[in-house]
Amino acid sequence: MSNVSRGAYFKGRTRKWLIARGYDVADMEIVRWVYRPGGNPIPVKRDQFASDLIAMNAHGIVFIQVKGGKQAIGEGQFHAARRLFDTFVFPDGVQLWIVAWAPRVREPRIIVHAQRKDSHGKEEVRQGPTTQEGDGHPFPRLEAGELIAYEGQPRQGPAPTSPTGAGNGRRPKRAAR
């Protein structure tokens, strides 16, 4: 069994385990193709936000890194996965899990990765981009049902259509000759 298929197995197993517990689950892996001159394209897989899966339910959002096989035996802490999580700024309330599947077990071991701490044991505050108003939030705060400006004007009515008028996703009818 290759490393790719082994990883896909444990990711699928984690997905089923989370769905059985009431989570909605999405894959966070993106596949890009590298084209070689005169050769076949090569798929290159990359995780987004250092996560294999993202799961959410009514209580919160969880970014998940999946580990499996012999490396998951024992009390390993997966420091490389923790360092990858630490390279991103996650909002408050988001959980970061490392799900470890040891061979021949029915339930995984879940390691909850905590917020980064500074040298004094306090949570490290990492600032992202800010708006020009200086409120510290990179996006405008909107209330439910509030209009968003569309190309400088408040958007009203149905969604914009293509120049051909085919806003329903179908090709426009051909003109009669």
Image (cartoon, rainbow, N blue to C red):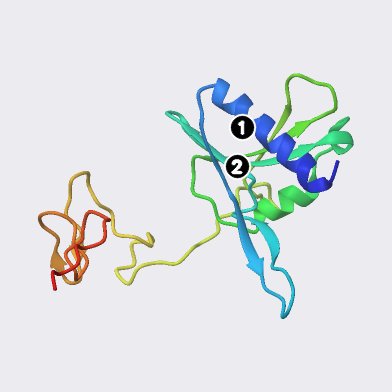
x, y percentage for residue 134? 34, 67
Q: Residue furthest front?
A: 177
Q: Secondary structure at mark 1?
A: helix
Task: Classify 10 Å Cα crowding around label 2: few (below 14), some (14-19), many (20 and above).
Answer: many
x, y percentage for residue 162? 22, 66
Q: Earlier in the sequence, mark 1 or mark 2?
A: 1
On the image, which quarter does residue 161 sit in? bottom left
Does residue 127 appear left or right of residue 134 in this picture? right
x, y percentage for residue 107? 73, 21
> Is the residue 133 above or below the residue 168 in the image?
below
- Residue 53 circle label: 2
**Which quadrant is the C terminus positioned in?**
bottom left
Does residue 176 appear left or right of residue 84 in this picture? left
Task: Classify 10 Å Cα crowding around label 1: few (below 14), some (14-19), many (20 and above).
Answer: many
Q: Secondary structure at mark 2?
A: strand
- Residue 92 circle label: none
Does residue 69 appear left or right of residue 25 in this picture? right
Depth check: give the residue in front, 113 or 26. 26
Residue for point 15% across, 69% down: 175
Depth check: give the residue in front, 82 or 37. 37
Circles 1 and 2, Cβ within 8 Å, touching? The answer is yes
Going by the numbered disc 2, the residue's amino acid type is Leu
Residue for point 66% across, 51% down: 85
Q: Is residue 118 visible?
A: no
Residue for point 73% across, 35% down: 10
Depth check: give the residue in front, 72 or 112. 72
Going by the numbered disc 1, the residue's amino acid type is Arg
Q: Which residue is mark 1?
A: 15
Residue for point 49% across, 34% down: 56
On the image, which quarter does residue 54 sit in? top right
Q: Is residue 30 visible?
A: yes
